[in-house]
Image (cartoon, coloured by chain):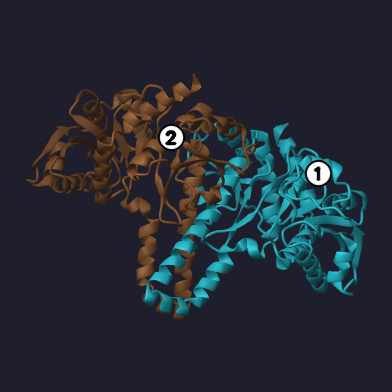
Chain colours: A brown, B cyan
Amino acid sequence: MKVVVDAFGGDNAPLEIVEGAVLALKKHKDLEVILCGKEDKIKEILNGREERIEIINADDVITNDDVPTEAIRHKKNSSLVVAYDTLKTRDDVIGLVTAGSTGAVLAGAIMKIGRIKGISRPALAPILPTKKDSDVIIIDSGANIDCKPVNLLHFALMGSAYYSIIYNVESPRVALLNNGAEEEKGNELAKETFPLLKNAPINFIGNKEGSDFMSGDVDVMVTDGFAGNALLKGTEGAVSAVVSILKKSIKSHFLSMIGAIFMKKTFKDIKNRVDIQKKHAGSPLLGCKKLVVKNHGSCARANILASIEQTMKLYENKLNQKIEEAILKLEETEN
Amino acid sequence: MKVVVDAFGGDNAPLEIVEGAVLALKKHKDLEVILCGKEDKIKEILNGREERIEIINADDVITNDDVPTEAIRHKKNSSLVVAYDTLKTRDDVIGLVTAGSTGAVLAGAIMKIGRIKGISRPALAPILPTKKDSDVIIIDSGANIDCKPVNLLHFALMGSAYYSIIYNVESPRVALLNNGAEEEKGNELAKETFPLLKNAPINFIGNKEGSDFMSGDVDVMVTDGFAGNALLKGTEGAVSAVVSILKKSIKSHFLSMIGAIFMKKTFKDIKNRVDIQKKHAGSPLLGCKKLVVKNHGSCARANILASIEQTMKLYENKLNQKIEEAILKLEETEN
C-alpha cells in the first residue's frame, strides 16, 4: 500500500512528519510512502533511511495565512498541491496524509479529488473521549459552517460508516445535537434534519444535548460545522480549564502537593484519556473520492504514524465503498 | 424591597424554596417576600417564621410536561402565573424569583410582563468559571433558538450591562462566539452580527472560539441560543467527564487513593470553582420590563437566597435603566 504524505504541512514539519513516516514504514512492511516537499531537507532528515520511500520535490509551502482556494490554484509547487496531484493521478496511491492548513486541505480535496457521488459535502469528524470506555466522534466539526438538512443527513451516514470501521461496531449510536431531547426541539436546521435521520439506514437514537457528548451514550454526534466547532472547542477549553484549576490548587496547598506525588498514575491516566488528540490520527475528510487524513497543525511523529495507519485501515475496510453503499440504501428508502 | 417567589417551581419545591426565602429574610432586614403556592404547605414549612412574609395562595403547579404558552394561559391558579400576576400588578414588588420550567418562565415573562422598549428578545445569561479568577457569562444560552443579527446585538448590550453590575467592571470584554478569530469567519448569522457589535457602545473584543470560553479572556460570550446551549452544556458535560475519569482512576490505583486523602483541599477547591451553579443565583431573564431571576430546577435553598440577593442587587444598580440607556445610545450611534 502506498500513501502520499505532505512532508511540509504543519508546525513541526518537516522533521516530525518525515520521522512519523519512518515509524510507519518500520512497523508496516507492506507500506510504501511518497514524501512531498523540499527534497534536500527531506534527505537530510532521512539520512540514508530511504527504503520504500519516494521523494517528490516541492519547493513551496502553503501556510495558514494563504487564502485556501487561491493557494491550491496558484501554489502549484507547494508540498500539499503536489501531494494532491500525486493522489489524483497515481492509481497506486491509496491516500494522503497531511497536517497542513485545514482550509487548504479542504479546498484541495474538493478542487483536486472531488466528492463521492451522492455526498453533498465532505466533513471532518474528530474523536473525543467519553466518561465511559467508548469514544465519540463529532461530524461536522468545522469544515461546513452553513449547512442544510441534507448535509447533516450525509454527515450521519459517513460518520456511522467511519465509526463502525475504526471501532469495529456494527451499528454505532448516531444522535442529532440539539437543545433538548424532545423531537420538536431545535433550530430550523435541527427540526428539518430530525425526520431525515429517523428514516435513514443508521441507528438513530434521537436528539442529544451538549452535555451528552462525552457521556458515553452517543457514538456519532451529528451537527453543522458552526455548532460542532463550538461544542468541540468548548469541550477542549473546559478540560483545559479544569486541569489548570487543579494544578493551581495543588500548588497552593502543601498537603495537596504531597498527595499529587502519590497520584502520579491517576494524572497519567487522565492525560492518556483526555489528551486523546495526542495519540490520535486526526480526522479523515469523509466523503472524498480518495482517502485524505488531516492531522492537527501541531501534531508530532506519533500522530503522523497514526494517520498513516488510519489511512491503511480505512482503505482495507473499504470506507468509501461503505459510504457509497449507504447512499444507495438511502436512495432506495427514498424511492 | 419586596420580591415575589414562586414557591412551587423546581424539583425541590416547596421546602428548599421557602427555606431559601427565610435565609434571605434573615440576612436582609430591608427585604420582604411574597410566597406564591399552596398556603397550608408553605405555612407548615414556615412553622411560625412568618415575619415579613406574605403568602398568596395558588393551588396549581406548572410542570416541565406542560406546554409553556398554554400553561401560562390556562393554569391561572398555578404558583408561577400567580407570581407573575403579582409582579405585574403590584408596584411595590421589584422582581420575581423562580426555579420553575424554563419554557413557562420565558412564556410568562413575555406574555405577562413584556420586553424593555427596543429589546427584540429577552435572553438568559448563566455564569461559568474560567481558568483565571474571573467568571464568564454566555448570552443567549437557550431561550432563543433561531436568532437574527439584531437579537445578538441586543444580547451583547444586555450581557455587558448585566456583567458590569454583578462584577463591578466598567467595560466587560464582549466577544462573538465564532469558528475562528478572523473578522470574515463564521456562519451567516455571525458574519452579519460582527459589524453590528463592532459599532455598538460596548467593549467588543472580536470573534472568539469555544476554546476561549473558559480562558478568562472573555467576560461576555455572545451567540444564538442553539450554539450557546451546545457550548454551555458541552462545557458542563466535559467538566463532569473529567471528574468522572479522575474518580474512576483514583479507585483503581492504591497509591492514588492515599494521594486523594492528602488532596482533600484541592478537590474542595475544584468543587467550589467548577460547581459554580451550586452557589449561584441562576440567570436573570435579561430584557424584561421587570426583574425575573430563574434558577435551575434542581436548585437548593442557598441558590434561592442567591437569586433573591441578585434581584435586590440588580434593582439597586438599576439594571433595566442601564439596558434602556444602552439601547438609546445605540439608536444615537445608528442615526
- The residue tagged with tag 1: helix, strand or loop? helix
Instruction: Please tell me whether residue A153 is drawn above or below residue A207 in the rendered image.
Output: above
Left or right, A164 with reference to B140:
left
Circle 2 residues within 10 Å: few <14, some 14–19, many ≥20: many
Tell me where residue B101 appears, x and y as whole percent: 73, 50
- The residue tagged with tag 2: helix, strand or loop? loop
Left or right, A294 with reference to B111:
left
Circle 1 residues within 10 Å: few <14, some 14–19, many ≥20: many
Are labels 2 and 1 on one chain? no
Q: CA distance from mark 2 to mark 1?
A: 42 Å
What is the chain letter for disc 2? A
Instruction: Please tell me whether residue A168 is drawn above or below residue A151 in the rendered image.
Output: below
- What residue appears at the point 87 percent right and 74 percent down from the top-left corner? B47
- What residue appears at the point 23 percent right and 28 percent down from the top-left corner? A87
Q: Amino acid at mark 2?
A: Ala
- What residue appears at the point 82 percent right and 59 percent down from the top-left corner? B5
Most foreground residue, B113 or A150:
A150
Q: Which residue is mark 1?
A: B71
- What residue appears at the point 40 percent right and 43 percent down from the top-left corner? A126
- Quick one: quadrant of the N terminus of chain A? top left
Q: Which residue is mark 2?
A: A143
Left or right, A142 with reference to B159:
left
